Image (spheres, rainbow, N blue to C red):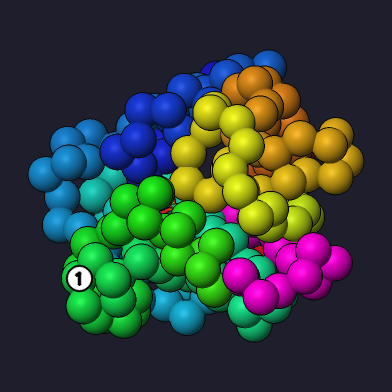
């Protein structure tokens, strides 16, 4: 059984990844003492940059192991791709008085969703297209081996629907099954989500045999 370490402190993400990886005979683990490691500053301009930076830096603490890190967020076309890499701190101007790229802390989901609705208040339904994006980077000993990008296309509603999920899920309507992401079960979400899509690409790459030094 091969082993992959996920650079996250989120037990939900670890569980999801472990469930998807099991049929591929890949064991998923966390990075030892992850919480005590210095935080990697996510100051990249793209999801790729941030995912690579996290995977490379954390892989230095787990010699010889494949370490996977992800970065994800919401891109809204009418907002020229915002909140994008700043999705987790989109409400920073209201909450912390600074622009999202200068904020040191995330802002809560409720404040982020409120800002999103405010920014889109004059945007008609047909112009509210958006996508969730997730980029996974796999690294070993400080070098990225490959990256994988998954997306989910939808639109932003003008009011929340559903109570599952997190983040922007209640505002993200997924036309393919006519539900918001907050109305999906955990299984449905992993089937349709950007994170599930990126992780399935990663698993397919593992199944081909992890190439030393290869790049995706
Ligand atoms: P991270 O990559 O886990 O740091 O996610 C960044 C931010 O993007 C989160 O705080 C959420 O606001 C948003 N986001 C990423 N993935 C999802 C999702 O599946 N549903 C809702 N919001 C998400």
Taking the image as shown, residue 198 lies to the left or right of residue 38, namely right
Which residue appears at 28% of the width and 71% of the height? 94
Q: Which residue is mark 1?
A: 96
Farthest residue in the left direction? 36
Q: Is residue 43 left or right of residue 145?
A: left
| Residue at the spot 47% in from the left edge and 55% down from the top edge | 113
Residue at x 39%, y 49% (from the top left corner): 110
Q: Quadrant of the N terminus?
A: top right
Tell me the residue at 79%/63% (across/down).
125
Vertical arrangement, residue 143 with respect to residue 158, above or below:
below
For this rendering, which residue is in front, 97 or 9? 97
Residue 139 located within the stretch drawn in magenta: yes
Q: Which stretch did the figure color magenta?
A: 120-140
Asked where in the image residue 11 lies, by quadrant, the reply is top left
**Depth check, front residue: 214 or 178:** 178
**In this orientation, does residue 30 appear?**
yes
Q: Is residue 177 above or below residue 168?
A: above
Residue 58 sits in which quadrant?
A: bottom left
Q: Nearer the viewer, residue 173 or 190?
A: 173
């Amino acid at each position: 059984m091969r082993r992959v370490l996920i650079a996250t402190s989120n037990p939900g993400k670890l569980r999801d990844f472990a469930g998807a990886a099991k049929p591929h005979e890949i064991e998923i683990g966390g990075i030892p003492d992850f919480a005590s490691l210095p935080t990697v500053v996510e100051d990249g301009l793209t999801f790729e940059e941030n995912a690579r930076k996290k995977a490379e830096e954390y892989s230095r603490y787990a010699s010889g192991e494949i370490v996977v890190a992800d970065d994800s967020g919401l891109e809204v076309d009418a907002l020229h791709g915002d909140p994008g890499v700043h999705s987790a701190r989109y409400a920073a101007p209201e909450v912390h008085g600074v622009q999202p790229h200068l904020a040191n802390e995330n802002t809560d989901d409720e404040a982020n969703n409120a800002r999103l609705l405010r920014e889109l208040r004059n945007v008609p339904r047909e112009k509210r297209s958006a996508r969730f994006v997730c980029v996974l980077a796999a690294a070993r000993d400080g070098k990225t081996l490959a990256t994988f990008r998954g997306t989910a296309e939808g639109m932003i509603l003008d009011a929340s629907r559903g109570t599952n999920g997190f983040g922007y899920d209640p505002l993200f309507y997924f036309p393919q099954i006519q539900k918001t992401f907050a109305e999906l079960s955990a299984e449905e979400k992993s089937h349709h989500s950007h994170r599930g899509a990126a992780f399935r690409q990663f698993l397919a790459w593992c199944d081909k045999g992890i190439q030393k030094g290869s790049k995706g």
